[in-house]
Amino acid sequence: MPVKSFLIIFFLALLIPSAARAAIIMPYILGDNMVVQRGVEFPLWGMAEPGEEVTVEFNGQNVKTFADDKTGKWKLSLKPMEANSKPLLMKVTAKSASFKIENVLVGDVWIYGIQTPFGGNVRKPEPEIIQPPKEIPGAKDAKPNAEPQPAKGIKIMDPLVRMFEVKQTVAKTPQELVSGNWINFDTGNCSRFPEIAYEFACRLKTLHNVPVGIVNISWDGSSTESWLRDETLRKSQVYAQIFPYWANALQNFAANKKKWEEDVKQWERIKKSRPKTTSKKPEYPDGPESNRQPSVLYFGMLTQIMQFKPKGIVWCQSDRIYAAPYSKCYAALLRDLVSELRSIFDSPELPFILIQYPAYDRRQEFPAEGATSFGPFIREAQLLAADIRNLAIVSPLNLPGESCQAAAADRILAGAIATAYENKPFSPGPVFKSMTVENNKVKITFDNADKGLKAIYAENFEGDKSSLEGKTVKITETQKLVNGNYVPERKITADPKSTAKVIKVEFRKAGEKLKDGNIAEKDSSWLTIEDPVSAAGFAVAADKAPFKWANATIEGNTVTVWNDEVQKPVAIRYGWANNPIGNLHSLDGIPANCFRTDK
């Protein structure tokens, strides 16, 4: 168990006399609008005058303790409580001072750590127009027929969903004076909520009829090792290459930054002369402010919330691995991360929902991307953690429908139900089991596919395609010349001979901004298509030969893979790309995991 630091808040420290401000000090996470975790002994902690008695009154409980005679630190626990959606008042009292924590709910609290640009934030709604009443009692100059006006100060609220934002902080020592606050879901704050987190919270709220709190510790681009203690990282030789990398990065930061500035200027010149170039802007070099350094977010962010009691953790990690092989290093990092977080929150089997590495970058073009595409290596390593108790691995790939956030929340919810509410194993989806070669064909068998397999994919087409719902279809792709460049053009038509069937159509109208500044409505349809026979995303290779795209036919829980140009196949890869095209699923709709047989 790591040493736990008490987090300190100085209320108006510069304005309140020292004798008064020393009376009661509590952490920011124990503040107005918070959600208290139901069903557990819930801790409260802080500082007071040494030896002073501290009393907490909340929800019918009256609990007392004494501050330490030397340090002034105190801690007590409330008895387990049932969910309560009625705003409650908490009173904290000492001999020389007291204060109130208002608008407190009792429900479920989830730690939310999404360290990738996945999902985005909730869109801020348009100002609400309120129709004024026809008559205003007591108003002599009332105008019943006046035009409706925007209501000032009116907020659209979801009163049962709250979020605590942990301030993004890089540190080498425990941080006790970093601020944060619980916020309501309203027109002023909703755009600060990660959309997937809010969708997930809404589903939990509806399913269990409880308030839901999200403790957001997300920071895009952070590494796994930044959330682990230094002593945890140094205990294993698997991580040996991490520390030399950072020692070199910090020592040479000034030179690396100067080179980066020169590279950016060169990139800007190329971008200006060739506007359609796809080259990416050079990445800023690692240095002393980087959020990927070992342990800096453990100290900078986790120490702010260490003693809080959550229901579970939702986590997604975007990593660059400095040690080789990728999979071995990351698998060890992941196991240590789960162990570390469970230790921090003093819960050896705390439910942990791991969102696999999301798709990013361009759509897969080649049968198997090279070692520089580390996405599939990370997904492969994450799968090695599937045996950790109370851990659910959730894939963010092949999210059907118009809203990937809603679909992702559905999958996260399924993992949460299994691990946190029903205490049962959660299937990570079809996993490669074995392969057999017969002539030029390879038969692949899968675990977690007892009911069978099918291909599922989502496609977007212009116009209203609702007439295709329930029909088998054929998708064709041609090249179309646009402004001197060839771009792919896809068409979909009904085809009674096809095995691919449209099972759902989501039609929408979207505004498209024209060059003249006007907005034109554009119709589009999201189609969810199932194919019980043919799958995509498989590649095959002969000995010491490059991979080639392969045909893939489904039969039960097996897939037969082949390419007529590969007469002696020795290796198969599936979904081996940062942004794969693979569409294989279990009959329950869970995506198959990427794999390679040529490790």
Image: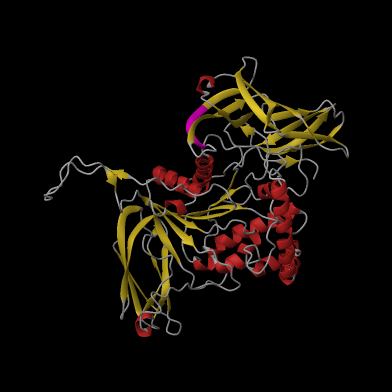
Q: How many marks?
A: 0
How is the rendered protein coloured? secondary structure
Q: Is residue 509 magenta?
A: yes
Across and down, in percent, residue 479 comes to: 70, 28
Across and down, in percent, residue 435 comes to: 77, 34
Across and down, in percent, residue 44 comes to: 41, 68
Q: Residue at x 35, y 49 (%)?
A: 157
Q: Quadrant of the N terminus?
A: bottom right
Across and down, in percent, residue 464 comes to: 51, 24
Give the answer, above or below, for where 65 lies relative to 522.
below
Closest to the observer, 290 or 432: 290
User: In terms of secondary structure, what is the magenta stretch mainly?
Assistant: strand
- Residue 113 appears in which quarter of the rendering? bottom right
Residue 518 falls left or right of residue 531:
left
Q: Is residue 574 magenta?
A: no
Give the answer, above or below, for where 126 lies relative to 39.
above
Q: Which residues fall within the magenta stretch?
A: 505-513
Closest to the observer, 180 or 30: 180
Q: Quadrant of the C terminus?
A: top right
Question: Can the viewer see residue 527?
Answer: yes
Residue farthest to the top?
496
Residue 420 falls left or right of residue 102:
right
Closest to the observer, 184 or 532: 184
Q: Residue at x 51, y 66 (%)?
A: 306
Closest to the observer, 70 or 214: 214
Give the answer, above or below, for where 24 lies relative to 302.
below
Q: Residue at x 31, y 74 (%)?
A: 98
Residue 117 falls left or right of residue 548:
left
